[in-house]
Image (tube, rainbow, N blue to C red):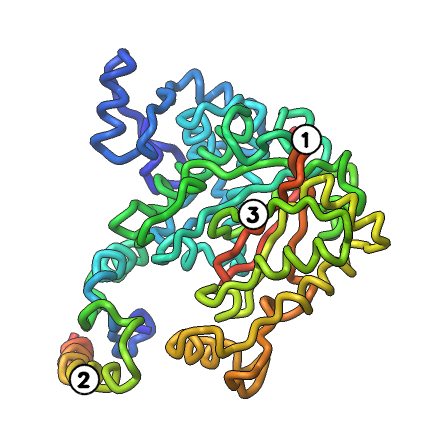
Amino acid sequence: MSSRDNAPERAAMFEAPEDFEAINKLYRERRWSDGLPIVPPTRERVERMLAHTRRARGEIVARLAPGFGAATVEHVAINAVLAGCDPEYLPALIAAVEAVAAPEFNLQGIQATTNPVAVWIIVNGPLAKRLGINGTFNCLGEGTWANATIGRALRLILRNVGGALPGEMDRATQGQPGKYTFCCAENEVANPWQPLHVERGFAAESSTVTVVGAEGTMNMNSHSKDAAELLRVIAETMIHPPSNEYTHGGEPWLVLSPEHADILKRGGLDKAEVKRRLWEGSKMPAARMSAEDLMRARDSRAAELGKIGPDTLLPISQRPQKIGIVVAGGPGTHSIYVPCFGNSLAVTREVESQ
Amino acid sequence: MAKRGRAAVTICSDAFLTLGRAQARALGSPDLPIAVIAHPFGIRTREEVRKMADQCVDEVVKLVGASELK
């Protein structure tokens, strides 16, 4: 069964050898995999997956740049099988496909760029617990079936339906490990503030996926117990001159550990105030950029900032509210800075109940 | 633009030609005229970019002419 077929009605079927090695050889030769072995998408497995949505198999969920292939419900299901997803994961994956196709996400840029950007999926609401999506220990590492396979399935869809094959339409200079899979839940129980989906306008009892164009993860290990000091070192980590965010005015993200979030909460700070202080603290003198990058920033941010001179303090994003914050992880003094693509806004979509 | 009857040319650096051709096919314009310039582009000075534009302009005019004749 192929997921490269663009016809919206029905994915193409093909006869394949039964043994695992032979079918994986076929997928490898045709570049239908991400470089890892796949689960053969037999008719039976795809039907089991499709039983978990009320949508018609031929319904187009979205057309995906840069090849603008039609991602039907069936195509999504096939790639979910390939990735090893449990059938119950399908609605979350459909919502993720809808989210990446939203114009403000700029999938065209994300898929075709030389930048290493990967799509990070954040799951909120009761579904995260029901599907076993990890938001605690090692939530961005290996070892949790749902995190690993949902992220992998989206990547396979972006390749097989969107057509972003490395060296062809995906022009990434190096890429990054997150392009294999990049998915976690928010640790809502340990979050002292509103969870991400509520902050973004959804009901607490709803379940959502949020997609972010993420360049990678930068660890911040601080044993500080003081809110102001902790914010200072985080803000200083966010500052780096060859950054798409300072060039374009982006949407940087932070994964705060529950311990760090607790310190900030006990310091009397709500999430909005944390964002405001980080935005102020991460302003960077434009002169720290290279001359060429400074010219690019002038071209990109003139409407927002007016004339940019070497002494101009560049904010990392247009407004403090554009800094994204989730609380995730287990015990420990590690938070993560997630620099982002710059020309992309995160998108949240509600997951349909089955 | 071409689909609306206007002459259209895309300028693309050679490192992105594969992407440009593949995307033109995907969007239903397999014969999209593409003028090719040398990569890398991002590290050039403004002066170098002007020289590249001067060198490219004849190719662009030729492609526009060919496009209008169709």
Determine the chain carrying the residue at label 2. B
Identify which residue, A264 or A140, lies in the foreground. A264
Whether residue A352 can be seen here? no
Residue at 59% x, 52% y is A347
Label 1, label 3: how many angstroms apart (C-alpha)?
16 Å
Q: Which mark is residue B57?
A: 2
Residue occupying the far top of the picture: A19
User: Do the numbered discs 2 and 1 sit on residues whose CB atoms are within 8 Å?
Assistant: no
Determine the chain carrying the residue at label 1. A
> At label 2, which amino acid type do we have?
Val
Q: Which residue is mark 1?
A: A127
Q: Which residue is mark 3?
A: A211
Residue at 27% x, 12% y is A18
Element assignment for label 3: strand
Q: Residues within 10 Å of mark 3 (few under 14, many from 20)?
A: many
> At label 3, which amino acid type do we have?
Val
Label 3, label 2: how many angstroms apart (C-alpha)?
41 Å
| Callouts 2 and 1 in the same chain | no
| Callouts 1 and 3 in the same chain | yes
Determine the chain carrying the residue at label 3. A
Identify which residue, A298 or A107, lies in the foreground. A298
> At label 1, which amino acid type do we have?
Leu
Marks counted in the figure total 3
